[in-house]
Image (tube, rainbow, N blue to C red):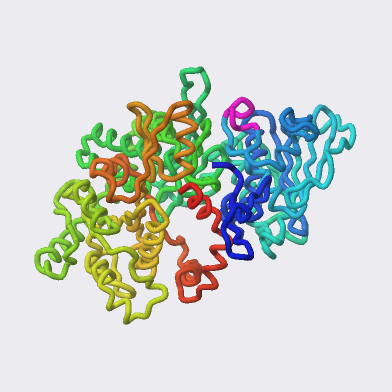
Amino acid sequence: MSDDLFENTPTSSGDYDASSIEVLEGLEPVRRRPGMYIGGTDDRALHHLVAEVLDNAMDEAVAGHASRIEMRLDEGNRVTIADNGRGIPVGEHPKYPGKSTLEVILTTLHSGGKFSGKAYATSGGLHGVGVSVVNALSDHTRVEVARDKTLYAQEFSKGAPTGKIEEIGSTPNRRGTTVTFVPDTEIFGDRKFNPKRLFKLARSKAYLFAGVEIRWKCADSLTSEDVPAEAVFKFPGGLADHLTEQLGGRECVTAQPFAGKQDFPENDEGLQLGSVEWAIAWPLYSDGSTSWYCNTVPTPDGGTHEQGLRAALTKGLRAFGELTGTKKAKDLTADDIMVGAEVMLSVFIRDPQFQSQTKDRLTSPEAARLVENAVRDHFDHFLSDNMDRGKALLGQVMERMDERLRRKQEREIKRKTATNAKKLRLPGKLTDCSGDGEGETELFIVEGDSAGGSAKQARNRKTQAILPIRGKILNVASATADKIRANSEIADLSLAMGCGTRKECDPENLRYDRIIIMTDADVDGAHIATLLMTFFFQEMTEVVRGGHLYLAQPPLYRLTAGKESRYARDDEHRKELEETVFKGKKVDVGRFKGLGEMNPAQLRETTMDPETRSLVRITLPQEFEQRAVVKELVDQLMGRNPEHRFNFIQNNAGDMDRDMIDA
């Protein structure tokens, strides 16, 4: 599909013809649909602009061309980020005669030096949209480039240049790129940058690459007790220094944290694949946290690098348990090891793949293998070099495992009691699991009898139960209490869970370890999933808070070339596969209209098998005070007032438009 964005604009007569099609060129799509590029126009999106520019500067540092970065916040919502790297090229671009390369980069989507891998081995920017998007959404942008001992500058407004690039003069002692921008109030309204948030961003970036120095400056009027006017960040110990600061004086299971760094091996072409750095500690009397990064970009939803670390730690502790004669260690899970730990993981890899433009989740499949292989050997040494340390950690993790198994047994007893003693009270459509096999029990909520039939054949009968529902369930956010109680689908869901609702909701009585919403990978499926998430948020909040609710990730396409087949989650993933795995090949593309069209083997492989599937856990903010913010958002988007939904759709319809065009 073209990068241009098409819109249906009815003519005054109401006809739909060629004149109804509007073509948005250049950076117009960004200004019309900012949600497609930065996730919206809220505070998070506003601060994402800074992250995009800072990531470019960090890429220069990681590539070995810059040692210093400066971030400055001034009055008037003005941010400046400068590095002492190579500087953006300023010569005329061969493809655009009369335009400087700087202007092309700032005004053209999908332009940059990170596609071929020649200018940057690893980088946070991939698609060539970062700085051009910042430019498009800024009222004023000024870029200064010090290159070859000469200073150049060019200014822009709302994505368009206000003049040609200028040669300012000689600058023998300066090099690199400086970007200054002021976000456009037409896009972001009166939202202002949060000095504390930007200060923490600058500090965290310095931890992620030990060789860089980041200088922070802030206007005096914007300083506070937590935000100084000036600061310099440089941490030779990298993530280990960050972990030490995070722990403070807290006592941990092991006196020394598990920290280290390892380069990945070279590929068949002799190219370095990247590296991984980690720092982990297990506090004794407090909860921990997790921080995941790829190429210095935060990936709050984790991803394949997280999977690799979890596998390395799990296999390492199981092996250590076998070495020390602790037979029960074979039952350890990654959650037994990770829950409560302070975990920091940073990877640098070539051509990473993310779930979206905002890069919240890493999806590169090779990252899991690279991280696991790199970390595993170090963890084995960490445990066995000091047997007392290894035994202390194993003992603490075993206690958590015993507690998990005890609670599971209690739930199983309650579940079997409910099954045997109150069998008639369970929904007739529920196909229950036996619950006496290995592994945790799961309930798949599926859409319709057709999908339910495929899921029943694809499931593991011992651990996986199936509950089909009829289409779009009641929107509980806009329904009265009497209407909710009278709804048969809601009643079936409540009975299947067995844990009560609202104030009576007790996750300890939940009959399954995981509740998995499995709907079609289309707009209707997304709507049903949204209604179900609304139900659980309102009626069974503590089930969500306890981490029991998940979204399945069924594929939308199957791509086949010869004997090789791959599944694609969505159009973006399909495009990635066509440009990488199937590049230059004739590809046969099949689209699944629904889960019911997939044969049981395909459904098992892609969506239900714990070894090959991908789940998204639905969570609530960790701090209870934030629940009101989430509830307000749910009420606005799912409640009775359609005006709130209309405004949200206007601001976030880009992805929907693109899906409709592709379809």
Q: Nearer the viewer, residue 302 or 23?
A: 23
Q: Which residues are magenta?
A: 113-121
State the residue in front, 361 or 414: 361
User: Residue 94's spot in the image, x, y percent?
Assistant: 73, 28
**Left or right of 133, for residue 344:** left
* Residue 223 percent location from the top left of the image: 72, 59
289 horizontally vs 357: left or right: left
Q: Nearer the viewer, residue 382 or 119?
A: 119
| Residue 344 in sight here | no
> Which residue is depicted at the point 24% across and 54% down?
450
Residue 634 appears in the figure:
yes
Q: Residue at x 59, y 51 (%)?
A: 6
The vertical placement of 58 against 426, above or below, is: above
Dominant secondary structure of the magenta stretch?
A: loop
Residue 147, quarter of picture:
top right
In this view, the residue farthest toward the bottom is 482
Please state the horizontal and vertical placement of residue 496, each as a whole percent of the image. 22, 65
Q: Quadrant of residue 548?
A: bottom left
Residue 117 lies in what quarter of the image? top right
Q: Nearer the viewer, residue 234 or 39?
A: 39
